[in-house]
Image (cartoon, rainbow, N blue to C red):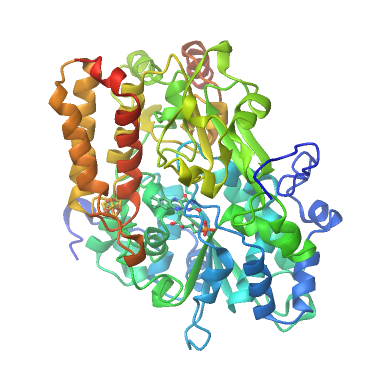
Amino acid sequence: MTGHSDPARFEPVLTRDVHLQDSHTLRTYVKGGGYASLNKILKGGGPDDVTQEIKASNLRGRGGAGFPTGKKWEFVPKDSPKPKYLICNADESEPGTFKDRLIMNKAPHRMLEGMIIASYAIDCHKAFIYIRGEFYKEYKILEGAVGEAYEANLLGENISGSDYHLDVVIHRGAGAYICGEETGLLESLEGKRGWPRIRPPFPAVAGYLACPTVVQNVETLACLPDIIDRGSGWFKSIGPEQGPGPKLFCLSGSVNNPGVYEAPMGVPLSELIYDFGGGIDGGKALKAVLPGGVSSAVLTAEGIEGLNMDFESLAARHTILGSAGIIVMDESVNMVNACLNLARFFAQESCGQCTPCREGTVWLVQILTRLFRGNAQRKDIDLILDVTENIGGLSDLSQGSYGKTLCPFGEAVAWPVRSFVEKFQDEFAATF
Amino acid sequence: MNEKGANDQTFRFRNPSQVENILSQYPDRRSALLPLLHMATAEAGYITQPIINAVARIVEAHPSEIMETVSFYSMLHTAPKGEFILQICQTLPCSIRGADNLVDHLCERLSIQPGETTKDGKFTVMKVECLGACDIAPLVQVNNDHHEKMTVEKLDKLLKSLS
Ligand SMILES: Cc1cc2nc3c(=O)[nH]c(=O)nc-3n(C[C@H](O)[C@H](O)[C@H](O)COP(=O)(O)O)c2cc1C
Ligand code: SF4
Ligand code: FES
């Protein structure tokens, strides 16, 4: 199947209850069929069956990297004497992204059921929700949902009369973008500053307290109940087979109706902007789009023509689906200023551990500030490209090496900054 | 541990059983650090040296290790803040929708710089990065509440309602 979508036939999955007043309550979730999947697996053929079903669905992580979920679970060593941990990554801090917040607010039990299913599959008995510190309202809602689940014996000892037990702890972050990166998150959960770790070992082998740990995004987990309920074949039939499923897209910036929209993976970007988003604010012309948060390479108006929103289609245009935070820029947005804004964000949020990232991001801010103020020279453009090469060049993902830095943040700086300079050269050159 | 001078008061959590409850949720003591620091902030307003010393004893770490963690996180403050913390989002989606002049306007109205607190202890202005609510940009967060689609006029009204 191609990425072509038919909105008339697609029925929302992740957001199907969110219009209901009490969609966050256990009662409403159960009324809509919630927790049936949990009961199904508890009576079913065991953890391996669950892993195989998820693997067969081709579900890929929704947190940014798009790693196949079932495959990640298979990396967890079965014979380890150590406890295993599942962590729900609810740190959502990628600029332009606010989809996980919607799930936490309106469908916390869908996420929680997904957590229990994933924990069961990897033989975990203690799971954590690492929630962004600023999300206080969402924290309170999750606290309520977890409480309800304990009371209904969906958490705790002998869940639904089975011999499976699971505890869930909600852990609040304290303000640091890098704690969304899974190894930074682990350090933070261990009570330290969120400095990403050298890989290998990968978290699935040695994560939280050096125990096997699976870190999974909120939306990824929220996909699980329906895969168990309707089968991997159903899931795989939605959008492109190699990275299918229902998907949440966040629209922000110069659109008439910013918001979170659910569509099949592979929905055309133009459909999201013009149909769901109601078109460009004030009837202005479209200039540029960041398709996957500020860590993705920017696309021009011509560059989005015929573009479908799925992992492969975006990779073919040298950018990423990332967090699916689509930031739309109209003709009045100054590209030098936009690029400076990103650079400032990255300089602010670099954890400071690697020299190219810590110092390079500050240089970028200085050079871009010069450009923005009109006192730069042509060689400053080359300097920007040099600095980005220094921070994010030489990646070899097969070796777990992210350019010249410890974590993918380095590339997340280099790609977008470089893409702005290359694709809007004239506008940059016009400043001197 | 230096407990002399300005830091000679000791800090005790109001509810020791809550401390025990937090510790019991984690496999090791150090993991309880962020929840304990959040609780201390809720009780004392900001993180003082006596709090750092007390928490260090609880999680069995050196106070300097606790300080190292505290200094990493933007939500953990080591100085008092105003009654209302006005957080102005600066990041691209908010900037595109007109956030750029909000901070300047606010600072001019209150005669302070970003990061500072008014003399009466009422307002602190902070420039912050994306708060995950770009659908209602430009965003201003006051303590735990979102104020959406901010303009200079709405900001003035908001200030008045808080004064
Ligand atoms: C700088 C950086 C920030 C990240 N922030 C988040 C985040 O806020 N939420 C998230 O789920 N994943 C984030 N990730 C991705 C995580 O490292 C990890 O891949 C993800 O949580 C795995 O879950 P998934 O496979 O379900 O997507 C970030 C990665 C990087 C490099
Ligand atoms: S790349 Fe940047 S954010 Fe990542 S570990 Fe290095 S300094 Fe920290
Ligand atoms: S950019 Fe301001 S809330 Fe996201």
Direction from residue A235 to residue A185 in the image, left or right: left
Q: How many marks?
A: 0
Q: Where is residue A222, by image quadrant?
A: bottom right
Q: Position of residue A340 (x, y in %)?
A: 30, 28
Residue B87 visible in rendering: no
In the figure, B12 relative to B72: above or below?
Answer: below
Direction from residue B42 to residue A36 in the image, left or right: right
Front-lying residue, B129 or A334: A334
Q: Residue furthest right?
A: A31
Image quadrant where one finds the C terminus of chain A: top left
Q: Residue at x 31, y 30 (%)?
A: A422
Q: Position of residue A157 (x, y in %)?
A: 69, 78
Q: Position of residue A404 (x, y in %)?
A: 23, 54
Q: Where is residue A431, by image quadrant?
A: top left
Q: Position of residue A21 (x, y in %)?
A: 79, 40
Residue A101 visible in rendering: yes
Q: Residue at x 58, y 54 (%)?
A: A218
Direction from residue A83 to residue B92 in the image, left or right: left
Q: Residue at x 28, y 58 (%)?
A: A406
In the figure, A184 relative to A323: above or below?
Answer: below
